[in-house]
Amino acid sequence: RQTASTGRRPSAMEPQSFGHHGGGGGSARQPDMAVRSPVAHGEEAVYALYYTVRGMATFLKRPHLWVKVICPMLVTLVSTIVSLSVLFGMGLRPQAHLFEMLHWPGWICWMMAVICVLVEVSLINLIILLVLFGCVQSQIMRSVLEEKGILAELARENGGEVMEQYCYKDVSHSVGFLLLRLPLLILTLPLNAIPVAGQIAWVLLNGWIYAWELESEFLVMLDRRFKCSHQFSFVKGHFGAFATFGAAAMGLELIPFVGPWVFFATNACGAALLAERFYLEKKNQHPNNEQPPATAPEGQE
């Protein structure tokens, strides 16, 4: 554990809950919530999509966060230039010929080949950001949560400190997400050959895991969910939010140049706003600081 630095107490925090359902609280060993209606899932999906937009405004209003994207910007600039040169020079024609084998019109074949090359370049940048700069998103997210007073509130409720993931568990979770996301990103890549619908399906299939990875550290702070199985029960109960936010965030980050330079950081801010909503939802379900039984840390079960 590490003692979290405190910030100001939260001011009037906007939305109060996703709907009439359980979710944020309760022991991770118990069912997180009752069966929720499609309306509740749809409501939280809309709000999650909204937070990707609010994340942009949040980032732009905080110049002290801008410096954190300088290194990712330089690295992805180099990787983008190199991968564009290599793939357009060596990969464009072979991919166009593959589409010609499907007896598609020539202009469609070349257009789809160009789209595939751009997606492949974006995927390369996505992998670089995932492997090298995941910690930057965590720092941005914590900074926003601290500024909004969420970390201070969690520390107060937990006796002066915020629950942190144990080092070995943090590393194992990071490796686990990497081993889960990379194969799924690559295996589902052929979906991009289908215009529009394929790209939407691709980010939906991969996005919810991305959102989970962004919120993973906060779920430990919120409910002591140290294990992936405990976190997955929360993700499953809020799947509309995770799928929608993750898909929109991934779609933004796939935009060449701007995606890894700007939206990589704004999505971290959006994830912090989504985390704030999860906290408020739990607080409303357990007023007067009546906290639900928490999951015991590893080694105390």
Image (cartoon, grey):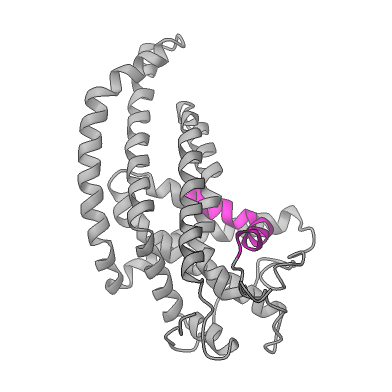
Left or right: where does residue 77 sit relative to residue 244? Answer: left
Q: Compared with residue 127, is residue 9 higher up or lower down, i.e. above or below?
A: below
The quarter of the rendered structure image containing the C terminus is bottom right
Q: Which sits in the foreground, 83 or 281?
A: 83
Point out residue 72 in the picture as x, y percentages from the top left corner: 27, 56
Q: How many marks?
A: 0
Q: Compared with residue 249, is residue 288 higher up or lower down, i.e. above or below?
A: below
Task: Specify the quadrant of the image occupied by residue 124.
Answer: top left
Point out residue 195 in the picture as x, y percentages from the top left corner: 47, 28
Is residue 190 part of the magenta span, yes or no?
Answer: no
Q: Residue at x 50, y 71 (%)?
A: 166
Left or right: where does residue 201 sit relative to residue 260? Answer: right
Residue 85 appears in the rendering: yes
Q: Main secondary structure of the magenta part?
A: helix
Q: Residue at x 55, y 42 (%)?
A: 205
Is residue 243 part of the magenta span, yes or no?
Answer: yes
Point out residue 12 in the picture as x, y percentages from the top left corner: 54, 83
Q: Which sits in the foreground, 24 or 38?
A: 24
Point out residue 276 in the picture as x, y percentages from the top left corner: 54, 73
The residue positioned farthest toward the right in the image shown: 34
Residue 16 appears in the rendering: no
Q: Compared with residue 244, is residue 2 higher up or lower down, i.e. above or below?
A: below
The residue stretch that appears in magenta: 227-248
Q: Which sits in the foreground, 2 or 181?
A: 2
Q: Residue at x 42, y 59 (%)?
A: 267
Q: Which sits in the foreground, 8 or 184?
A: 184
Task: Specify the quadrant of the image occupied by residue 96.
Answer: top left
The residue positioned farthest toward the front in the image shown: 299
Left or right: where does residue 288 sit relative to residue 159? Answer: right
